Amino acid sequence: MHGRARCGKILGRVGKELGRPPGKIADIATFAARDFGIGNRRHENCSILTTSVLYLLDPNDPKAPFPNVAQAEREPDGLLAIGGDLSVTRLINAYRRGIFPWFSDGDPILWWSPDPRTALFPEQLRISRSLRKTLRRGLFHTTTDRDFDAVIHACAQPRSAGGGTWLVPEMIAAYRRLHHEGFAHSVEVWHDSTLAGGLYGVAIGRVFFGESMFTRISDASKVALVHLCRLLSERGFRLIDCQVLTGHLIRMGAEQIPREDFVRMLDRWCQVPDWHGRWVDGETSTQCHQEDSSRNLDGYEDEVTR
């Protein structure tokens, strides 16, 4: 059976079983083995059951370790675990290990660690000539952590008519908790007094884990990324996790990194004392004045393809 189809059938069954008490999780692995020919075993020293397709996390034990990301599925790429919860403790543990949640409305919680991983080093951001012109015109101004709720709700809007969203209410509530605890941050891009674009993500140590961005006016999300890279560079951040590949990110300097290398970077840079708490810095104009344009823009590489 095709990997995605097989996974879909199992998730349909597992989703009905995850509400059972933790002691019944073994029954899920049993039906997976019986109905789909998938072996199961208990992960050493943790309350996780494994199959050849996924790991089942105990929703009542947020401190339980995740399985090794090397055991994630190749198809669908990066699927590692199912279930658990979206508590602050579980989410921070996940991000530190290169794992993130991603699921649709009606599905159980799914945890992913794709290989390769798309990432951006802040100092390697590419700014196209057209974007430089936009920045110099001063059409936008940016803020950080000024309106996290507005940003995440804008990111949750479907990208097309009739389209769905992975930012379901449960996920929005989880990232709002992370924001309240000083881990999740937003960048807002304003045109006059209207929110024109933005992004949000999670900061741990010297790594920023980008989650989503949106735009309502051309270039607004790109302006948000430029502002983020400047801010992170000033604060000594080493890496932005972009999770999955998009042409937009690649054109702005992101690259794909083998998961093994990415995890080693996390092991090093997530341990560094971080900029915890809110990042409100007031309004910062994206207009680059002539006297400091080399500092603000010329430190970044020109984008070859415009």
Image: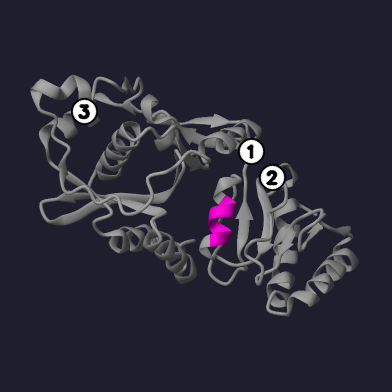
Instruction: Please indicate whether residue 79 sits to the left or right of residue 294 in the image.
Output: right
Q: Earlier in the sequence, mark 3 or mark 1?
A: 1
Of the residues under marks 2 and 1, which one precedes in the sequence? 2
The location of residue 8, given as percent across then percent down, is 70, 62
Badge 2 amino acid = Val
Q: Which residues are magenta?
A: 89-94
> Is the residue marked by circle 3 packed among few (<14), some (14-19), or many (20+) residues within 10 Å?
some
Q: Disc 2 or 3, which lies upstream in sequence?
A: 2
Secondary element at tag 2: helix
Q: CA distance from mark 2 to mark 3?
A: 39 Å
Residue 132: mark: 3
x and y, in percent, of residue 206 in the image: 44, 38
Q: Disc 2, disc 1: CB below 8 Å?
A: yes
Which numbered disc covers residue 69?
Answer: 2
Report x, y in % for residue 285.
14, 40
The residue beneath circle 1 is 115
Residue 150 percent coordinates (x, y):
28, 62
At 40% across and 54% down in the image, what residue appears? 184
Task: Give the CA separation, mark 3 to mark 1.
Answer: 33 Å
In the image, residue 116 sits, relative to residue 189, either above or below, namely: above
Amino acid at pointer 3: Arg
Q: Can residue 92 be seen in the rendering of this structure? A: yes
Residue for point 62% across, 56% down: 111
Display colour scheme:
one colour
